[in-house]
Image (spheres, grey):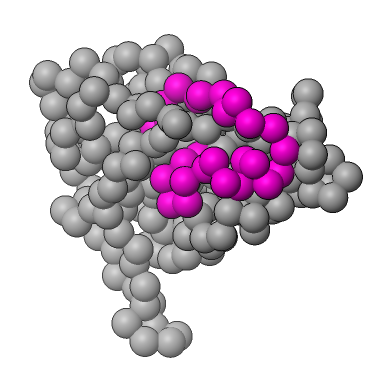
Amino acid sequence: MAKAPFPEPLSEAARRWLLHLARRALRDAMAAKDPDATDLAVGVAERPDEEPRLEAPARVFVSWHDVRELVGCIGSLEPWPNLEQAVVRYAVQAGLHDPRTSPARPSRWHRMNGEISILGEPHQLECVGFDAIAEAIMPGRDGVILGIGSRQAVFLPVVWRQLPRPHDFLAALMRKAGLSPIHDGPRIRARVFLTETFGEPVVAPAHPGAAASHAGGHSLLVQYVH
């Protein structure tokens, strides 16, 4: 079983600050290439005075969605030396450089919501094989790193929202790793991890075709800790 990722979760003030850093970093990177992005709103947040985890090493993934459509999700399974620096780095990469999707654009800014996942240390499962791993993992809680040798892939716990059944979750993860559930399933190994995940609220149009309003602030947060 994966261990709790951290002794204490980040304070609400620290979460607000990190979300602000992510949005500001992405806005600044967009503005460097597109003058239309210069005046995009990023809200206001203050850095908490006493929050040692902000300067500690951390495994981080940052994702951006246009309402619920993925704009990008990038991070690292290896600890970055500084949590704040990791958030800035991966906020820009996820927003502009995810090869699976189109980069963020100023016209989408008011609909975009950011999410940050801070990963605990991965724990190796003793069991081997598709069915055994499906029985061992906890839906809705565990992030999973799965593969054979160098062919590996990872799903964060948030993927359980789309794939709530363990067999479907693992089959999709195997396909992501370029592996076959039928031919490679008996040999796969897995590591599991927990995350502390928090994000901006989803901003949806009031009615079909209407423009959503987003002031860029973070007074309301979707917060949850796995």
Quadrant placement of the C terminus: top left
Q: Residue furthest left?
A: 49
> What residue lies at 52% left-to-right and 33% top-to-bottom?
192
| Residue 28 seen in this snapshot | no
Looking at the rendering, which quadrant does residue 190 occupy? top right
Q: Nearer the viewer, residue 169 or 196?
A: 169
Looking at the rendering, which quadrant does residue 127 occupy? top right
Apparent side of residue 209 relative to residue 174 in the rendered image (left or right): left
Q: Nearer the viewer, residue 39 or 60?
A: 60
Apparent side of residue 97 relative to residue 121 in the rendered image (left or right): right
Q: Nearer the viewer, residue 104 or 53?
A: 53
> What residue lies at 71% left-to-right and 52% top-to-bottom?
171
- Where does the image place residue 174, in percent across and percent down from the top left? 73, 45
Taking the magenta stretch, the answer to whether it contains residue 133 is yes
Apparent side of residue 174 relative to residue 7 in the rendered image (left or right): right
The range drawn in magenta is 118-143
Q: Residue furthest bottom?
A: 208
> In the picture shown, does residue 145 fall above or below 33?
above
> What residue lies at 33% left-to-right and 49% top-to-bottom?
199
- Where does the image place residue 98, in percent across and percent down from the top left? 63, 43
| Residue 187 seen in this snapshot | yes
Taking the magenta stretch, the answer to whether it contains residue 183 is no
Looking at the rendering, which quadrant does residue 76 occupy? top right
Quadrant placement of the N terminus: top left
